[in-house]
Structures are given as structure tokens and as C-alpha cells.
Image (cartoon, helix red, strand yellow):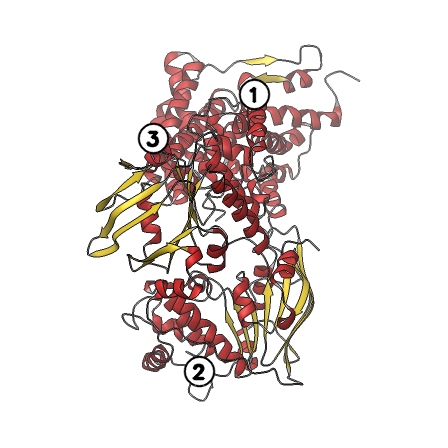
Amino acid sequence: MDATEIGLWGVPLAMLGGAIRVSTPFIFVSLGEAITERSGRINLGLEGTLVFGAMTAYAVAVMTGSPWLGLLAAAAAGLCFGLFHGWICKFRGVNDIAIGIALMLFGSGLAFFFGKPFIQPSAPDLPAIPFGGWSDVPQVQAALNVNVLFLIGAALAVFLWWAFRNTRAGLILRVVGDSSDAARAMGLNPNTVRLIATGIGGALAGIGGAYLSLYYPGSWTEGISSGQGLMAVALVIFARWNPLGCFAAALLFGGAGALGPALQSVGVTQGYYLFYAAPYILTLVIMIATSSPSRSLAGAPGELSITK
Amino acid sequence: MSDLGKRAVGVETIGMSMRFGAFTALDDVSIKVPAGSFHALLGENGAGKSTLVKCIMGFYHPTAGDILVDGREVGIASPKDASALGLGMVYQHFTLVPSLTGAENLVISREKVPGIIDWRKERAALAQFMERMPFKLPLDVKVDELAAGEKQKLEIIKQLYLGRSFLVLDEPTSVLTPGEAQEVLGLVRGMTKAGDLTVLMISHKFHEVTAFADDITVLRKGRLTGTGKVSELSHKQMAAMMIGDQPIAALDSRAPVPVGARQILTVKALKAPDRTGLKTINIGELDVKSGEIVGVAGISGNGQKEFLEVLAGQRTRDAGDVLVKGSPYGASRAEARTLNVRFIPEEPLRNACAPRMTVAENMAFRTFDLNEAGKPISWIRMSAIRDYATRLVEQFKVKTASLASPISSLSGGNVQRAVLARELTGEVDLLIVSNPCFGLDFSAVAEIRARIMRARNAGAAVLLMSEDLDELLELSDRIFVMSDGALVYETPIAKASVQTIGEHMAGHH
């Protein structure tokens, strides 16, 4: 048997590679959303931030020739979106979910508007590290070609998990997310903390967008996001607001997303479109399985408007 | 940081007044709390107790008057200034962050917290601090999972950890069992006697005041109406200072339960999930006869709320039967109507009213779709609703600006009167009541209890759930104790002892 023909083994291998490749934007968006939600606010606008980040990163990378500058620009754009959301939400009577939906549409629209001239030109990619050099099977090499952003995302998840418990900033974030009254009694201003948390969340979502346009799929189109920004919100809830859980859930969703292409690559020609829907079905199934009519969500930040 | 070496400080106010626009909440009040004393502040709702305390703690800026700490005049512009002077407050509602552990709560509430917290060092410091504390507490458990009494202790410990030596306790025992209350207050009392702490306690409970306080100050309608040594005052004198000369509704005497009274409510082997979904509540057997009040005691969070929700139809049950007069009861509107079941839940504005609908509409919830003969009608007549409400408002003395004002604009006592009017009018065979007097003032409490007793004497079966043991002892014919989702103890009122009930509430049996 030829080394390039590994038959059905290609499916789990492609899923592993896919999980690593596809999960990166999920990791960043969900970690960003975890920070925001831990502060007691929900930002549904991250889908728009993601798309706008993808456009910004691509545009800046095309113009400067540096993908890293593109990445920074995307983070900065995301930060602005996040701060804008956080600023509006401090006003009385403003609903964070409604603002999030508005910003989602606004971000995508703005990205399409500014992004028109950048559909044609090609931008430099973000670098990847080939961990598969030991094998001469091309599929293995392809699967283990890991982008640096994935590694940064993994490190960030571990760091956040540690920081939520062991740093002043982490504890303050949890205090604010759990009880505004307690926070105020401590002399903290919940709005300021939430503003910062939403800003950081936006910046991370922008980075997730940069990954989309600068690595995988690796070009700017208007259909670049297939709802990763929204699914990441569901993912945070599924992960019970735990950064490590977010990372694991992102891998799971990434693997599910890679199922369709993987089946196609081994020659399944019928019905593989159905498997393209796997991440969405997984979202639905998970949400149903982890919810209950008679029980409130364990571990939910007390100030979160969806769990009140 | 933690500094128990600090000695107790004394606090004095001179001529304290506070006006909100035209309304005077506090009128020339001078009180003196000497260092190391245990002082009780008494008064009805709205008497100005919290206003006074908030002025001392820097939440409000008094319109006039001075504050002296240890004999020196001080300016307290914010809660920060107050804490710098060593003044701290324990609120009636917990201010701990539920999802953080005790240790995390303590450390994060400190003035200066390092950017990265070295938990090994902090734990060692906390352990050392706790050694000098009169309470023992698990600090590595999430506050969520602590019992109410433990939370209250942690609140107090937090204040001491922050180096406060003058504490305001706002109704500190309202969520505790008698045993827990005794323990917490006793320990605090010990610290005042040792001269480490000064306490100003807001309370409604005379027996606590008598047992623990040195002096009292009484406020009524923003004015100082009395002060003195606890040892020289009787409960009656204290009550007179609190409520003045307004009439108090007297409780009807208890008519004996007739022999062979009909069994109205029967609950058998009821099982339902509790709020977390992790535990089940399990009511083995409970029956309530016509003409008796059956009380259910328990610390909040032991399944009483869920039991009530099942009876009210707000929560589905997994197994078991609820029978009213022998027929199965599922809490539908039709069943409630034919079986004459009435319901007075706790927090009536939230659980029994549509807050933005008018007083008249809220009072007509049971009857708006029936005509005088009790038959369904297809067109609703607003005039009939208004007439009905007018009659009830007069009969139950509901104070409202107008029948057309939203019910949320009424005071707590009047909302409860309106709900009572709705539920107690007409024929009542079964009345289910939960914490009917929570947060109400003296006269409203007396009146509401009198109404419940009257309904009982008229032949209604009453199931009364309450966290207030005094209320249960005053009204009930039999008392059950609910603990950990089950009825664990039953006693007729003649043999009821606070001690035994308290022990069962705490789950010590």
C-alpha cells in the first residue's frame, strides 16, 4: 500500500487537522466572550467583530505586506467594537443583547463596504509550524501543520484559567460578573470593569477574524465567516464559562466542522453536505442536552442577562 | 490589613437631620453608642433607622448634624471615609460574592490586593487570622454552598478582617435559625464585652434585644421617641415607643378544632426536583383539616419554596398526590375555583400581582370573568370590577391613591392587604400562605395575622409556611419542620418548644 493512500484513516486524521485548523477562530472568539460574559455582559456582536477583523487584517496585510501588522490592526478594530458595545451598554435601559445584534449587522456591513477593493489582491499568510516533519505521509504533515495562533490560543486559555483565580484582575472580573451590588460595596465600578472586559473580548474576536482571512481559508470574501462568532457564544455557555472548557469545546466544534471536507476527500460523494452542517447540529444537540426546564445553569455569572 | 489590635470605637450623632425634598426622613436625632457597647436601634419600617445608619456610614450626606467618633468630630463624605475610621456595616442582604470562595471574598475585599495573588501566603495569613476569631468557618468552599448562618458569620468576619471596630448589623438574624442567631449574637456580644468591638444592631426582635443589647434607641417617623437601658425597659414599653398610640388589631381567640373536622388538604408521597435540579424534595404525608392552621417551619432553602410552588402549580411534580377534599388537585384555575383554594405567596407583588396593572384589576384576578351568580361571562364589565374593588378596598383598609393606580405604587403592607382581600373574599376552604408578613410593619403584621386567624375560625384549612418562628408559634395548631427537602418533625402547638424546633431546622436530628 502506498504511503499516500491511507484509506479511511484519512477521516480521523483530516478531522484532527481540521480541528486544529478550524478551531482557532472559535478559541479566540470564545475566550473573548468568556471574559466578557464573566464580567456580567453578553456581546452577541462578536460575529460582526470577527468579520470586520478579518477584513481589516487582510486589508492591512495587503497594504503593508506584513500579516502581523494585519493581526494587530484586527485586534485594534475589535477593541474599538468592544469598547463601543461596552460604552453604549452602560446607559440605563440599554439591552446588551439588542446592542450586540445591532453591532453584529453593523460590523458585517461595514466590513463588506470597506472590503470590496480587497477581494482580488492576495495577502501574505500568517506562519505555521510544521510539526509533522517526522512523518513522510503527506496527510499527517498537512494535519500537523499548526499555525502559531493556535498555539497562542492554547496558551491564552491556560493563562486565563489561571488568571481568573490567581490575579486581582481575575477576581475583580468575577466579582463584577456575579454581583454588581457586592462590587459597588467594594468600591468597584461595574461599568468600567465591563467596558474593559468587552473591549478585550472584542480584540480577541478581531484576532480570530484575522486568522480567518490570513490563514484559513486565507482570503477575504464576504462569506468568510459561517457564523463562528455566534456559535462561539453558545460554546461559552456549553463550556460553563471555563477557559479550558472553551478550548476543548472549540476543538470539538472544529473537528465536527472538518467532518464534511474529510468525508469528501476520501471519496464519499453523497450526502456529505449534510456533514457540513455537523457543527450546527452539534450546537443544537449540546444546547438541548445541557439544559433543563427545572434547573438553572450551574456556574453562570449571576449578572448575566440571559440567565437572570 | 487584618488588625484586631484595634480597640473598639464609640460613635455619637448630634442633631442629625436628613431631608429628601419636602420629606423629612430624619429629624434631629442624637444617639450615643459608647465604645465596647452593644446598642439596639428599634423602629418600624420607614422610621428612619436605615437613613440614620446610612448617614453614619457615609452613603448619605445629612442635611444637618454632626458625627463624633471617639469624641472627636469627623467628616464622613463617603463609605471609604467611614471604613478608614473603622466603621463597617453588615447588610441584611448578603454582600458576599456567591461564586467566590470565602477566602477569595476576604482577599478581594481588601483595600490593597496584589496583582498576582500568592495563595499559599494568603492562606497562611488567613489561617492565622481565623485562629483569633470566635467563629470557625470553611474558607475554601464557595459562598453559594454555605448555610445562611455561615454566610452571616462570614460577613461579620469580613468586616473584622478589614479592621473595622464599629459594626452596624442590619437585622442580622432575619435569615438564621434560633440556634444560629443565638450563637452569632452571643459571639459578637463576647467581642463587645472584651472591648474589641462596638455594635449598633437594627432589629425587630425584642427577645434578641433583651438578651444581648446594653441600650436601645427607638425611632418613629424620623424622630427619636425613646432611649434607655435594656435592663430597665419591658417589651411593652419598647413597643409603645415604636408604634405610639395607634391601634393594633387583636388576634381572635382560637376556636377549638372541631372533632372529626373534615380533612381538606392531603399530600402523599410528593416528589419534585428542587431549584438546582440536583436534589429532590420529598413530602411523605401531610394533611390539613378544616379549621386548623398547620405551620411549616424551616430555614429558607430547605425546599419550602419548591413545595409551595408545586402546590401553586408553578413547578411540576415527579410523583405523588395532592388531594383537596378528596379530589386530585393540579392547581388549574378551574380546580382552584370549584375546590375553593386560595393562595397567598411570599413577595406578593412579584408572585401574586401584575405590578403595572391597576389596583382594581389586580383585585379582580379571581373574579373578573364571572358574573354575580358565579357563571362565566364573555364580556368584561370594568364598572363591575371597579365596584368590586371599591368594596374590598374599604373592607380591608387598603390605602391607595386611586383604584386606577398601578399596584406597584402601593406600600408593601397595602399590596399584601389587597392580595388578602382578593384571596379571602368568598368561600375559602383551603388557604395556602407563605411568609405573609415579611418586611411589613407592626400594625400591618398584626392585622394580617388576625385575618388569617379569622379565616381559620371560619372553617378554612390553612397551610402556613414561614421563616418567622414567632409567627408560626402564634398562629399554628400544629407545626411541621422542613429540613433538606423533607418534613422531619411534627408537633402540636401545646408541646412545641423553640429549642427542639430549632434543632430540627438545623438538621441536628
From this viewpoint, is residue B122 visible?
A: yes
The disc at residue A155 is: 1
Q: Residues within 10 Å of mark 1 (few under 14, many from 20)?
A: some
Q: Which residue is mark 2?
A: B370
Q: Amino acid at mark 1?
A: Ala
Chain ID, mark 3: A
At label 2, the amino acid type is Leu
Image location (x, y in percent) of residue B13? 29, 45
- Residue lying furthest right: A1
Q: Please, what is the three-letter code of the amino acid marked with disc 3?
A: Phe
Classify mark 3: helix, strand or loop: helix
Q: State which quadrant residue A69 falls in.
A: top left
Q: Among all residues in the image, which is located at the extreme bottom?
A: B373
> Which of the pair B6/B112 is nearer the observer?
B6
Closest to the observer: B98 or B72? B72
Give me the C-alpha separation between circle 2 and circle 1: 67 Å
Q: To which residue does mark 3 refer?
A: A113
